[in-house]
Structures are given as C-alpha cells and as structure tokens.
Image: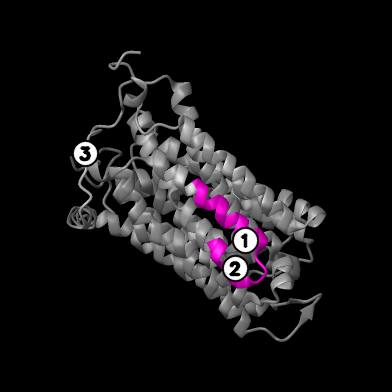
Amino acid sequence: MNKNTYPPTYLAWIIWGLGAALYFTGFYQRVAPAVMTDQLMTDFNIGAAALGNFSAFYFYSYFVMQVPTGILADYLGPRRLLAAGCLVSAIGTLLFAWAPTIIFANLGSLLIGGAVGVAYVALLKIATNWFAPNRFAMASGLALLIGICGAVCAGVPLRFLADLFGWRPVMFVSAAATLALTIAIWIFVRDDPAEKGYKSFATNTAPALDYSPLSVLKGLGMVFRYKNTWLLSLAPSGVVGSVLAFSGLWGVPFLTTHYGLSPSQSSAITSILLVAWAFGGPVMGALSDRIGRRRPLYLAGCIIASIGWVVLLYIPGIPIWILICLVIVIGFASGVMIIGFAFVKESVPPSLAGTVSGVCNMGVMSGPMILQPLIGWILERNWNGVVENGVRIYDLNAYRSGFGLMIVWSVIAIVLMSFTTETHCRQMVE
C-alpha cells in the first residue's frame, strides 16, 4: 500500500456502507410506529397525544445528540461513535419490544433516537475522509437513499410481519440484527484511509485533540458566526418535518380513515413518499454539484413541496392515482434538503465540518420532533369521541387543523432559504 495513493473505491464504499447500515436502522426505527399505530394504541391504551409523544421521544434524544456527535466526530472519529450508537440502539430496541407500559416504550424510543442520532454525522465525516470532495453531495444523497430504504422496510413489510407474528417478536429480531451490525462496524470500519495505509481526501486530517469544555464551546461558537449555519439548520426543519410527520406517524391513519384504504395500502403510499424522497436526494445532490449552485435548487424544491402539501391535504376527493403522483412530486422535491449538508460545510472552515454537520442535522430533526407530538395534541383536542376496535378515530377537520402546521413550517423554510448566501459548490472559508 502506498501512502500517496487514495484508497480503492470498493474499500471506501464498504466502510461507508457499514456506517450507512446504522442510518438504515435509524430510519426503520423512526418510521416503524406509523404502521403500528392501531396496535400500539390498543396495547398501551393510549390516544393520539400519547402516541405522538412516544414517537417524539425518538427525536428528543436524536436532536440533543447532534451537536455532541459533530464535536466528537471531529475529535474522536466516527468508528467509535458508530459502534457505540449501534450497541445502544440494540438495547433500546430490546427495551421497546419488551415494554409492558408506554413509559418503558418511551424510554426505549429515547435510547434508540439518541443512539442512531450519531449515524448521519459520523457518515458525513467518513465521506469527507474517504471520498473526493466532488463526491460529497452525492454520497450524502445516497445516505438518504439507504436511510429511506430502512423506512420502506418499516412500511408494508413491517406491517405484514407485525400482523403475522405480532410487533413485539419483530422488534426482538430487529434488536438482534442491530447487535450483529455493532460487531461488524467495530471490526471493519476505520476513521481515515491513513489507518489502512492510504492517502486521505480530508484537507485537515490531524486536528489538535483538545477535549476541554472551553475548546468545545469555542468550536461550537465559531460555526454560529456564519449566517448560513443558522439558515441552513432551520430551513430543512420545515421540509423534513412535514415529510416525517406525515410518513412517520400521521399519514397512515389519515389515509386509512379518509380514503377508505387498508393499513397496508396506506403504508404503501407513505412508503412511496419516502422512496421519492430517497431518490430526490442523490439526484438533487448530483445536479447541484454539476451546475455549481446550491441555493436556487434548494429554494425551488422547497416551493414545489409546499404547494404539493397544500393540494394533498386541503383539496378533498383527490383520485388515488393523483394522490400517488402528488406524494411522488412532494417526496422528490423534498430531497433538496440533502444539498444543505454540502452547502453548510462549504460555509465554515473545513476543521469544523463535523460540528456544523451536527448543528445542521439538529435543525433538520427539530421539525418532526415538534410537529409529530403537536399534531397529535391538536388531533386529541379535536377528537369527537368516536372509537373503533379500541382505536380513536379523528375526523377530516381534525387532521386538517393538525396538518396546517406542516404548511406554515414549509413556508417558513422558503423564506429562510431566500436569505442564504450561495457558495458555488466551493469552500468559502479556509
């Protein structure tokens, strides 16, 4: 091996792929409650507010972990973070599968969210070290694609298995699979090509390791000195919040109740939204790299997605084929949020890439973290007392009141993106 030679492509993808497998697991766990809403509400004897809060526990810890993860990714490296996160996720999944009450289920969800919260930022750090800079946006988009594949597996396939075996046995198997992934990550993943005898793609591979609180706060303070950090951390919350609030929890019961679809059919439509989102990410990332612009493409995607949500949620009696076309357009347009990670990384010094990625991902997750329980609270406030098979049924006006928050937030995203500064796909600060 030659230290002046970049690593072979296959090795870079294997190492990146193992990290992406944890991201796959994170999306699977994130969306799983959506297809089990009726079973969870029945087993735990809860309504929409409690269910929304349960789902939000995942995002609470995920949100909190983003800045610490970014800082640790800069100073400790992604391998330890990925392995530790995978192990804790396995423990959290096991606790959720066993949970006799919603309190233990909440705790399991909290552990899972915080654990898988390390995945994306660590994955971005691996991509920075193992891939050429002009491949970063594409790798970020492919990560989203793999994550969405996890979400799709938590759609119709999970519903089928949950109906066949029960949701608890399926979650026990998920915990075992996550534990196996922990072992694989620890054995095979390396932080930098230099550890394998190759040249790193990172422009700064040897940051000074200073773990003092003052140093940590200084690095965090530095990323917030740049306007794009604020705007590119808040704007995607409106994009991702709407997608995950609908596909991750409330879309299935909405479609089941008001379009007369079965839970499996509703899960299929929300999965289509996620698949379109998954493909939109790498396509938009590659297109942004090709045209050498970030802002116009991101802004256009936000506008298209916002219009799509208005049509889908507020125009009654939409034929199913048009409904499916709408979710495809919304999902694909929402894929522009992936550009934000390359966009914000180019807006700060390279040594702070992990930290700013964590801040950005923290903003991304604030959308679903707030929207999912808040929509559940509004549904509960507008519940008319109808119960079927032990599950509370919410009318169309209740859903429209809750989903109105998605529209407001998506419009805010458009406004924020309008104030960003274009980087032209180049590192603006050295």
Up the image or down, 64 lies above or below 115; here it is below
Front label number (1 vs 3): 1
Q: Is residue 52 visible?
A: yes
Q: Which residue: 49% across, 62% down?
A: 59
Q: Type of residue at label 3?
A: Pro
Q: Which residue is mark 3?
A: 207
Comes first in the chain, label 3 or label 2: 2
Up the image or down, 197 lies above or below 84; here it is above
Q: Secondary structure at mark 3?
A: loop
Residue 142, how many percent across, how many down?
A: 50, 38
From mark 3 to mark 2, how far is it between C-alphas? 41 Å
**Residue 99 is covered by the magenta coloring:** yes
Q: Secondary structure at mark 2?
A: helix
Q: Is residue 393 shown left or right of residue 109?
A: right
Residue 318, how many percent across, how many down?
A: 70, 63
Q: Is residue 166 shown left or right of residue 379?
A: right
In magenta, the rendered stretch is 86-109
Q: Type of residue at label 1?
A: Phe
Q: Which residue is mark 1?
A: 96
Q: Which residue is mark 2?
A: 104
**Residue 14 is covered by the magenta coloring:** no
